[in-house]
Image (tube, grey):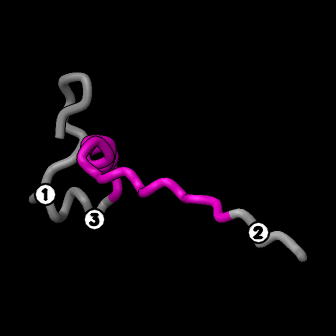
């Protein structure tokens, strides 16, 4: 993994993810773009008394 032209991390993708460094950070940022959005929460009105 290069950062501003300097080698800062090396290894397999699995190893780089396990270290939690720059590669893992960039991977997580990209993965967020493909994650499905959670379904909106629907509020149910309380039953009326009476």
Q: Residue 46: x percent and y percent?
A: 76, 68
Q: Residue 24 magenta-drawn?
A: yes
- In front: mark 1 or mark 2? 2
Mark 1 or 2 closer to N-term?
1
Left or right of residue 6: residue 38: right
**Residue tagged 3:** 18
Count of residue discs: 3
Nearest to the observer: residue 49 or residue 43: 49
Look at the image and say whether residue 46 sits in the magenta stretch. Answer: no
Query: What residue do we see at 30% from left, 53% from top?
Result: 36
Give percent across and percent down for residue 19.
31, 60
* Separation of marks 2 and 3 at Cα, in angstroms: 47 Å
Task: Pick whichever of labels 1 and 3 is earlier in the sequence.
Answer: 1
Q: Nearer the viewer, mark 2 or mark 3?
A: 2
Q: Tell me the quarter of the picture where residue 12 sits.
A: bottom left
Secondary structure of the residue carrying numbered label 2:
loop
Q: Position of residue 11 (x, y in %)?
A: 12, 56
The location of residue 18, given as percent across then percent down, is 27, 65
Residue 39 occupies which quadrant of the picture?
bottom left
Quadrant placement of the N terminus: top left
Q: Nearer the viewer, residue 27 or 8?
A: 27
Residue ranking furthest to the front: 50
Horizontal side of residue 45 vs 35, given as left or right: right
48 vs 36, left or right, is right
Part of the protein shown in magenta: 20-44
Left or right placement of residue 28 versus residue 44 in this view:
left
Q: Determine which residue is flagged by label 2.
A: 46
Label 3 crowd (10 A; few <14 / some 14-19 / many >=20): few
Q: CA distance from mark 1 to mark 3?
A: 9 Å
Q: Which residue is mark 1?
A: 13
Q: Residues within 10 Å of mark 1 (few under 14, many from 20)?
A: few
Rendering quarter of residue 4: top left
């Amino acid at each position: 993994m290069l950062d501003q032209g300097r080698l800062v991390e090396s290894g397999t993708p699995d190893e780089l993810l396990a270290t939690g460094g720059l590669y893992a950070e960039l991977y997580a940022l990209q993965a967020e773009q493909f994650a499905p959005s959670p379904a909106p929460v629907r509020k149910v009105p309380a039953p009326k008394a009476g």
